[in-house]
Amino acid sequence: MSEESVLKNRFARRTNWSFDINRVTETVNQLRLQGNTILDLTCSNPTQCGFSYPKNMLSPLSALENLSYAPDPQGLPRARQAVSDYYRRRGFDVAPERIFLTASSSEAYSALFRLLTDPGDHVLFPRPSYPLFQFLGALNDIVLDTYPIYYDTQWRIDFKALSAWVTARTKAIVLVNPNNPTGSFVGHESLMQIKALCLEKGLAIISDEVFWDFAFDETAVHESLVSHQRGLTFVLGGLSKALGLPQMKLSWMVLSGDEPLVAQAAARLEMISDTYLSVNTPVQNALESWLNCDVPMRNMILNRVRANYNFLKEAVAHVEEVTVLHVEGGWYAMLRLPDGLSEEEAVLSVLREAQVLVHPGYFFDCAEAPYWVVSLLPPEALFKTGVERILKHPCW
Ligand SMILES: Cc1ncc(COP(=O)(O)O)c(C=O)c1O
């Protein structure tokens, strides 16, 4: 047996990932070693994007009450009340009893997969979407089926394709609303169709609304599933996006639907949460005061992403070969490149020629090539220079 297969046999198959460095990362490393400064238009960590967070934000962490530990598997009542108030300010009535706190949305996904699926069961995800789903699926022994979202003048869910994927082993449909990286909200008609399908087939809906607060057009009406009263629905939200505080590790799930189902789900989730008790006490104690700053913190981020999106659209408007796709919300924008161009070669070319890093579309499992995805979070001056440099060194 080769050394490689001996090693593989020592570990679970679900961890047989490839650890090879991809060509893009390799090129970034080389260029940096040669002393080049790369303008990173993929940065999606808000704490690295030059925002000024309120100075007194950290004061609640030094409160003496943080020395006492009296955990509640669902999350401390005061912290759940703060999440309930957050929803009330957005016009939704969410009882604290229907809220579960987790350390992250990724952890919430894992808890929900443990709750809803047995090994080999299927869950439907949108495509394109955020890359961590592949790992979350594999780690929880589920099969990921993907339903397409396609672009005409805006992104739409292909409902026919979605429903064709549903089998007796499908347990849940994940909606990402608005989606990462397409920035598209799930429209009313799609929501009606998906709700009806889930009711008919007995499927849960997991609605990932972590980017909910970042709608570019504040007059547009978008539908949240937090108050969907039929079937079984879980809505995800959290500090990493709502306040741009990924390091604080606090997210939430909101349960809604038919009462007996919700009660069963809550009892089972409580046991799952009790097994880990992963949300730390100081952050839960601070939650109320942090969520009370949601307006300025959200505006700080929203103004940035909107300004960068507008700049990108204007800058690319005169470039015939490239189209900036319409974004309704979130932190990303997608560029459609000319047919036939290799996404990866185009990324490598712009890295070498312009020292700018962008994501290839395949990173987000984009079905048709070629796309690039850029983060709209970087500081405006850096973003502008990055875009200008790309346009000065066209690879199309
Ligand atoms: C759509 C979506 N959901 C969930 C997450 C994970 O969020 P968290 O940091 O709360 O785990 C991300 C992270 O980028 C995301 O893009």
Image (cartoon, grey):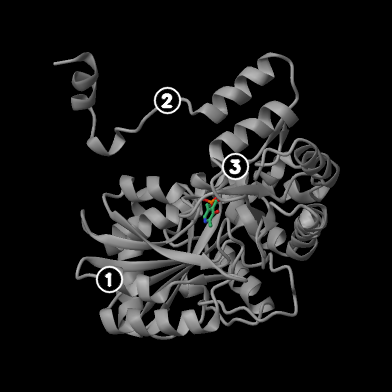
Q: Which mark is residue 166?
A: 1
Q: Amino acid at mark 1?
A: Val
Contact (Cβ within 8 Å) of mark 3 with mark 2: no
Query: Within 10 angstroms of label 2, few (less than 14), some, or many (20 or more) residues?
Result: few
First in sequence: mark 3 vs mark 2: 2
Tell me if I can see residue 70 in this picture. no
Mark 2 secondary-structure assignment:
loop
Q: Which mark is residue 284?
A: none
Label 1 crowd (10 A; few <14 / some 14-19 / many >=20): many
Determine whether label 1 and label 3 are within 8 Å by CB: no
Please state which of residues 323 and 216 is positioned toward the viewer in this rendering: 323
Question: Which mark, by number, is residue 359?
Answer: 3
Q: Residue at x 61, y 21 (%)?
A: 29
- Residue 240 at x, y percent in the picture: 61, 52
Rendered-image quadrant of the C terminus: top right
Q: Is mark 1 within 8 Å of ligand 1?
A: no
Q: CA distance from mark 3 to mark 2?
A: 18 Å
Cα–Cα span, label 2 and label 1:
34 Å
Across and down, in percent, residue 392 comes to 80, 38
> Which secondary structure, mark 1?
loop
Q: Which residue is mark 2?
A: 20
How far separated are the C-alphas under marks 1 and 3?
Answer: 31 Å
Q: Secondary structure at mark 3?
A: strand
